Image (spheres, rainbow, N blue to C red):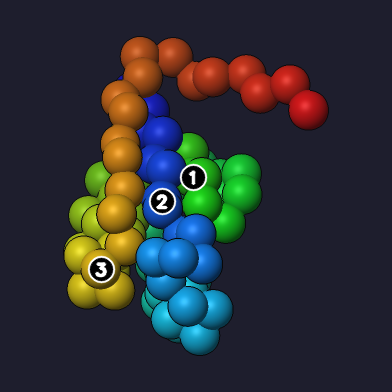
Amino acid sequence: MYALIALDISPKVINKVLLQNFLQEIEKYKTQGTNTSKIFESLWLLDLENGMSFLRNMLNEADHYKISYKVSFLENKPVFIT
């Protein structure tokens, strides 16, 4: 199972300094989820088989920085076309 997390990091919602602080905080947890992919600064894909701790920490930090987010749970890993 996978989780796709979309963060609302538009400049109207959060300033650049707070955004950088948030991103630095969640990067230090990234090793907890070996199959964690940052697709964009605002979009992350987590393999929940080993990424539940990272998901919990990321959402806690988002709450701390007052960043809105949406989480979609997916049965299979999505394929992104760029």
Mark 2 or 1, nearer chain start: 2
Dot label at residue 66: 3
Relative vertical location of residue 18 with respect to residue 57 in this rendering, above or below: below
Dot 2 or dot 3: first in sequence order is: 2
Helix, strand or loop at disc 1? strand
Q: Are marks 2 and 1 in contact (CB under 8 Å)?
A: yes
Q: Would you identify the image quadrant in which residue 62 lies?
A: bottom left
First-in-chain label (3 vs 1): 1
Q: Secondary structure at mark 3?
A: loop
Determine whether 63 is above or below 68 in the image. Answer: below
Mark 2 = which residue?
A: 7
Whether residue 73 can be seen here: yes
SS for dot 2: strand
Residue type at numbered disc 1: Trp
Q: CA distance from mark 2 to mark 3?
A: 11 Å
Q: Nearer the viewer, residue 51 or 68?
A: 68
User: Residue 77's spot in the image, x, y percent?
Assistant: 50, 20
Residue 44: which numbered mark, if any? 1
Does residue 47 appear in this view? Answer: no
